[in-house]
Image (tube, coloured by chain):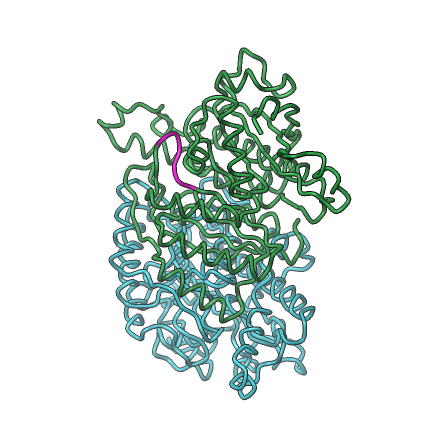
Chain colours: A cyan, B green
């Protein structure tokens, strides 16, 4: 249970039905003891995967006005900031301005920035948010892009270890992000080939696993000054873990993961030179609990009537649009049913992030 | 923990900071095992008690459009409906239309209608909502007006037992509301004089108590037909309980109480002729947990720095408006800290609602 004084300001989407955005993040944070201030960047009926969805977007002016009133009322007091889906550049700029103000008045603010822009090659925000996110990166304590979002932010196509090195270097060095966590990475052959055997799943199953990578800059303490002198270009510490892929598409998983990661990140309890350990422990908890919720969701959906668990089939979906919406409904995260898992009970085995020794071997400096 | 299939559609206000409206209701419902669909009738920075607050109201057209999309997507599937703060008649009419549709397609829908209009003589919605609420009353399973809202709905000024009889008769008979729960009633002398000694607090402390009344119509089962024949005008069964007043003004208490009442109301487990027992047991749980959260809130606020717990003083508040906002901030409900109480652990003593035998004595038929 978090310290009484911990308070998260969460800025992301709201849907009436189901669990994405704030609906996937706020309840877990509350269960883990955080007071949460909740800004809804949109108020929609349901997530876009249902085909039809609708509602209102909060404008930049409306966001600015609410932030201004909260500042006037001395209600901008979060110890942590969590930002997710913000659909346009103007609204995102309002959030950027707020993040700068919060960071300025409280330098210890922990900011988890999830640069929600798209997935698997498809953008679901206006493209003009990309440069704004790039401007915001130096404010972040942790970022949680997916594979596609790393490519959008860095301009590097990820196709081999040198490109992965380059992308992480850009995020850590050019954008000064201390902690980068990339979850749900398809385990392509070049990635599997580079993984230490301690992390690699049994070869027969590697295509049925996803990889999670966390990369943490060593933040030097005073006692470490000599290291800086002997190492021209200190690289990040990288941890990784493979998680079995659960077939089918589930929405809100990234939002839940980011919220759990933020909830379990406790740098105050960690000596400065163990920053990577602090991050990887939080990632381990977030991975474990997210996977447990997904398993429960899958189990629940398997118990539904047949029409609610039809496999993905674009042809058949076209003939009967409700086929898709029923499938989506059957796959909404079992967050309420799984709340004990979120609180940590019933978790028998933690999926520990493992040190990726030699990750930077062969990287150009 | 509620049945897996239980799903609440909650329609009320949203504030970024603090716990009123949906922020006071949704988390408790989720903790008690309900999936909650959340419609925000407003998106405000904070509750109006802070002096300054702002944001957007959801229009009737926006509500209708979201409800229409949800219906199209087969996402209007609540087993329970909870409505609270809805600031204008047009938006309220949209909610009325929805409630009728839900009730029509699922007659077993449990609808808790909290006719949030004002308190202690002050309206905080547009007056044109009153006739719309009157139209909606027959749809409700339970209503939770405060004292002032009973007066607004019935047009009866509550000043003695005959007027209380008349108001309840109007709600039960003219508006066909089966269950009426009025919490937080100041224990005026005529009310204290009428209370059975089993309910009355020790006389020295009666001014420091609030009364809660629940009134439940006997819903006749087939076996009871003879009662209807012998009794020309079957009256409701009334329960009541006194709860110690906690000094100071706390916001969101009614919203929390209504959510807990709905969560603990389980008519399916109850033989038809025990409707009053089923209601009074739910009220007992809601009263007990609400009071426990208030005590924790008070304790937390007493631990704050002095500037955050200045007593109410309109003169001093005028000189320094932040005096009031800081006091408000210090009195936000300790819902996250008190979540174990909501789940029922740490509750040593339930404040049982007691039968008010003879409540209807002397009432004109």
Image quarter of the N terminus of chain A: top right
Specify the farthest residue to the bottom. A315
Residue sitting at the far top: B204
Please state which of residues B226 and B168 is positioned toward the viewer in this rendering. Answer: B226
Residue B167 percent location from the top left of the image: 50, 32
Picture quarter with the C terminus of chain A: bottom left
Q: Compare residues A127 and B324 and report the one nearer the observer.
A: B324
Q: Is residue A329 visible?
A: yes
Task: Note whether residue A257 is visible.
Answer: no
Q: Residue A278 appears at what percent x and percent y?
A: 51, 55
**Residue that extends furthest to the left in the rendered view of this protein:** B319
Magenta stretch contains residue A60: no
From the top left corner, tell me how far across and down residue A241 is, in percent: 58, 69
Between A197 and A297, the one lying in front of the other is A297
User: Which image quadrant is residue A117 in?
Assistant: bottom left
Name the residue at the right extreme. Answer: B223
Q: Residue at 55% of width from left, 39% of height from top?
A: B173
Residue A69, position in %: x, y?
27, 45
**Residue A39 shown left or right of residue B150 in the figure:** left
Please name the residue shown 55% across and 25% down the image: B243
Q: Nearer the viewer, residue A354 or B111?
A: B111
The quadrant in which residue B125 appears is top left
B232 relative to A64, above or below: above
Direction from residue A133 to residue A281 in the image, left or right: right
In the rendered structure, which segment of residues is drawn in magenta?
B116-121
């Amino acid at each position: 249970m978090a310290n009484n004084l911990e308070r998260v300001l969460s800025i992301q989407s709201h849907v009436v039905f189901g669990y994405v955005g704030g609906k996937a993040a706020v309840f877990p944070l509350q269960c883990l003891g955080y007071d949460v201030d909740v800004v809804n960047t949109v108020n929609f009926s349901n997530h876009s995967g249902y085909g039809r969805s609708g509602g209102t977007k909060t404008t930049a002016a409306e966001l600015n006005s609410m932030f201004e009133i909260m500042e006037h009322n001395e209600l901008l007091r979060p110890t942590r900031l969590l930002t997710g889906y913000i659909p346009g550049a103007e609204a995102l700029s309002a959030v950027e301005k707020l993040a700068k103000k919060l960071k300025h008045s409280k330098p210890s603010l922990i900011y988890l920035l999830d640069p929600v822009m798209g997935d698997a090659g498809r953008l679901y925000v206006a493209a003009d948010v990309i440069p704004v996110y790039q401007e915001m990166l130096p404010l972040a304590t942790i970022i949680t892009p997916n594979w596609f979002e790393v490519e959008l932010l860095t301009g590097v196509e990820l196709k081999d270890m040198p490109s992965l090195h380059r992308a992480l270097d850009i995020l850590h060095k050019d954008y000064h992000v201390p902690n980068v966590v990339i979850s749900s990475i398809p385990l392509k052959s070049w990635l599997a080939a580079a993984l230490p055997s301690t992390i690699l799943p049994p070869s027969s199953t590697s295509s049925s696993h996803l990889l999670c990578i966390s990369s943490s800059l060593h933040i030097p303490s005073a006692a470490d000054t000599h290291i800086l002198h002997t190492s021209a270009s200190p690289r990040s510490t990288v941890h990784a873990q493979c998680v079995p892929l659960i077939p089918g598409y589930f929405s809100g998983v990234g939002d839940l993961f980011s919220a759990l990661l933020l909830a379990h990140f406790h740098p105050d309890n960690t000596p400065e030179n163990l920053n990577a350990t602090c991050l990887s422990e939080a990632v381990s908890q977030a991975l474990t609990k997210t996977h447990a919720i997904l398993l429960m969701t899958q189990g629940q959906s398997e118990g539904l009537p047949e029409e609610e668990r039809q496999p993905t089939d674009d042809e058949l979906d076209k003939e009967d649009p409700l086929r898709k919406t029923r499938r989506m409904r059957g796959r909404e995260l079992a967050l309420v049913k799984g709340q004990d898992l979120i609180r940590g009970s019933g978790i028998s085995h933690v999926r520990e992030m493992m040190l990726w020794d030699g990750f930077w071997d062969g990287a150009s400096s």
